[in-house]
Image: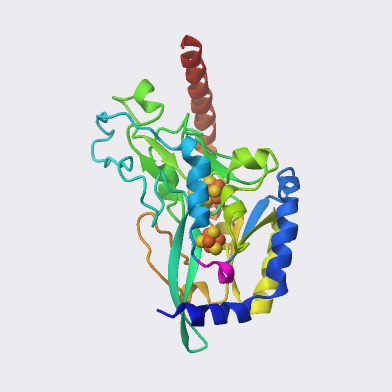
Amino acid sequence: MTSEISRRAFLKSSLGAAGSVAASSGLARAAAAAETPEDPLATLIDVSKCIGCEECVHACRESNAGKYPAPEKPFPGMIPSRVPVEDWSDRQDVSDRLTPYNWLYIQYARANKDGEEIELTLPRRCMHCVNPPCVKLCPWGAAKQEENGLSRIDSDICLGGSKCRKVCPWHIPQRQTGVGLYLELLPSMAGNGVMYKCDRCFQKIEKGEIPACIEACPEGVQTMGPRSEILRTAHDLAGKMNGYIYGEKENGGTNTIYVSPVPFDELIIETGKGRPHLSPVKNLMENGTHIALALLIAPVAGAAAAFSKFYRRVKEDEQ
Ligand code: SF4
Ligand code: SF4
Ligand code: SF4
């Protein structure tokens, strides 16, 4: 592991003007981008700037705490019974991986750069795919994509079947058992909880505000703007630092673009449950089977979502 001094010296030489220009201009345009679905809202993450301070992680938790699950115990039996209970409610402070209570974490990476061992830190969360399989293949229509390109899971509709996690190339969504619609609707027939992930602070973006993690970062690591502009800035930045881009083509393109001074496949990172990889990813929705499945389940998802919403309204009227 490299010392902080060598890392800082390396980063200082890597940082060009592009990073700071992007940080100031992109933020100002974020709200405008939210209104142009043909050029979705994207984020540039300049890995060379991140110091791993976790201010973004704390800000995410603080800003989104109201959306976190409050499960009822004891849990009903899982359907089917082989499905494991996933309960993070007693471990809400875990911050070194994604959980239903931690939608962003800092991933540590080691690499060799010009013969020197360096350490990098990467904020990791949902990539917000341009064509998100989690949305297209959710059988209940609980995962949805907004016009500005961000994807989110409606916790009022999700039954926790975890199809979204299975089809996500990075297995991002995380389940909490004992919460959600299934408790009232189908406890003995279906349902295992609710899936959670970064929703891009959609409620802040709707008001023209910046996501909490971006606002809190002392180093200006993240920049938001129209995807075309973010890609241009990413290429400028990569050119200046002799760097590499991740997210432009992965899974057909994502609305999260990382720029790193080291090739992504040379970063040594810890991966596993709740700790996504940085490997190349083919376009999952290019696969004919998945497209056919998406078309097949679309009407079912629409009907299920409508029914779930109707049921919720009835319950609210009763209260
Ligand atoms: S707040 Fe910024 S610098 Fe600190 S860990 Fe998050 S992205 Fe990195
Ligand atoms: S990264 Fe995974 S959870 Fe996020 S939009 Fe893409 S498929 Fe969905
Ligand atoms: S965009 Fe919002 S929800 Fe997503 S990681 Fe940042 S603070 Fe958390």
In the image, is 233 to the left or to the right of 266?
Answer: right
Which of the colour schemes (rainbow, by chain, secondary structure, one colour) is used?
A: rainbow
Q: Quadrant of residue 108?
A: bottom left
Above or below for 57 versus 263 = above
Can residue 138 be seen at all in this image of the molecule? no
Q: Quadrant of ligand 1?
A: bottom right
In the image, is 285 to the left or to the right of 146?
Answer: left
Can residue 227 be seen at all in this image of the molecule? yes
Above or below for 5 versus 20 = below
Q: Quadrant of residue 259?
A: bottom right
Q: Quadrant of residue 218?
A: bottom right
The secondary structure making up most of the magenta span is helix
Q: Position of residue 8 (x, y in %)?
A: 54, 78
Q: Residue furthest top?
A: 318
Count of all numbered marks drawn on residues in the image: 0
Q: Position of residue 211 (x, y in %)?
A: 60, 48
* Residue depicted at x 47% and y 86%: 116
* Residue depicted at x 71% and y 63%: 22
Q: Position of residue 154 (x, y in %)?
A: 51, 34
- Quadrant in which the N terminus appears: bottom left
In the image, is 290 to the left or to the right of 176?
Answer: right
Q: Position of residue 78 (x, y in %)?
A: 27, 34
Magenta run includes residue 71: no
* Residue depicted at x 47% and y 46%: 61
The magenta stretch is 47-51
Above or below for 60 versus 189 = below
* Residue depicted at x 33% and y 36%: 177
Q: Nearer the viewer, residue 91 or 41?
A: 91
In the image, is 71 to the left or to the right of 6?
Answer: left
Q: Residue furthest bottom?
A: 115
